[in-house]
Image (cartoon, rainbow, N blue to C red):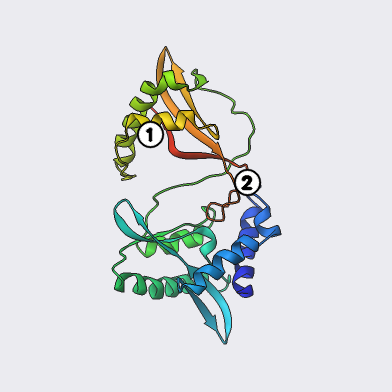
Amino acid sequence: MQPSIELWTTQFKNVKNTVKDIPEKWIIDVTATRLFLEEHIKTGKGIVAKTDGDVIGYMVYDRLPFHGADTAFCPVMGHASVESGRARIYQKMYKNISDLWVKDAVLDHIITFFSLDVQLKQVLINLGFGLYVVDAFRSADPVDSNGGASILKASLSDVEAVMRLGEESRYYYRESPLFLVRDKEKREYYEDFIRNNEAAVFLAELDGNSVGFMSIKKNPGDDVITLADKDTGMIDELGAYIRP
């Protein structure tokens, strides 16, 4: 277990040196990462790469339904390797683990990685992966411009505008190159988001028209999957959308 954690910690430090806003706690306290890896190893959801008995790489995953398909999902802390021969190690790890997935009829595979990792990005593209969803961290510094729009917190009286934009966003997300299929939601779905005291929906208005929304909340606890620690502001399930 410890060699895998050390591989992950080294990988994280390399990114943290460049992206300062990523929470530092993930290299100060590795308890959550340890528990995550232990759980997946115990349930047989992972592999390791070794040479001469030394662990040189690992990959663990979750199996979940994603847009109607049985999917294997490998989060950002769910894989790492030594630097030497890294491309070859990842190719061999994916060959072995994907063989297990395909034999179990799991044909959709998602791997999360740091965008700064150009080498791994190229390896994954060569293996047939494409970019799908992007998560990002930023500081809480004020944004210089609001594009001429006024921003207000939505109340229940704004539910029609939020619904209308939510339906527009549903069609937007399913278009190329996103292909992100979302279900049509009822009015109660949007009302629940607006009522939620732990979150907020903000509307952008331009020339008297509602042209965009963003739904945010504070993370209730540490999330090892997204590397967001407690009280990090997160765009939540309702998401964000602005008219072209």
Which of the pair 181/80 is nearer the observer? 181
- Assign the N terminus to one quadrant of the image: bottom right
Residue that mark 1 sits on: 189
Residue that mark 2 sits on: 230
Q: Which residue is drawn at the image coordinates 48% and 62% (left, top)?
A: 120
Image position, residue 62 (x, y; %): 43, 63
Q: Is residue 121 above or below residue 22?
A: below
Residue lying at the far right in this picture: please name it: 28
Image position, residue 200 (x, y; %): 52, 30
Q: Which residue is drawn at the image coordinates 51% and 74% (left, top)?
A: 42
Residue 244 in sight: no
Which of the pair 208/187 is nearer the observer? 187
Task: Determine whether, in the image, residue 177 is placed left or right of residue 200.
Answer: left
Dot label at residue 175: none
* Kind of residue at badge 2: Lys
Residue density around tag 2, few if under 14, some if 14–19, many if 20 or more, within 10 Å: few
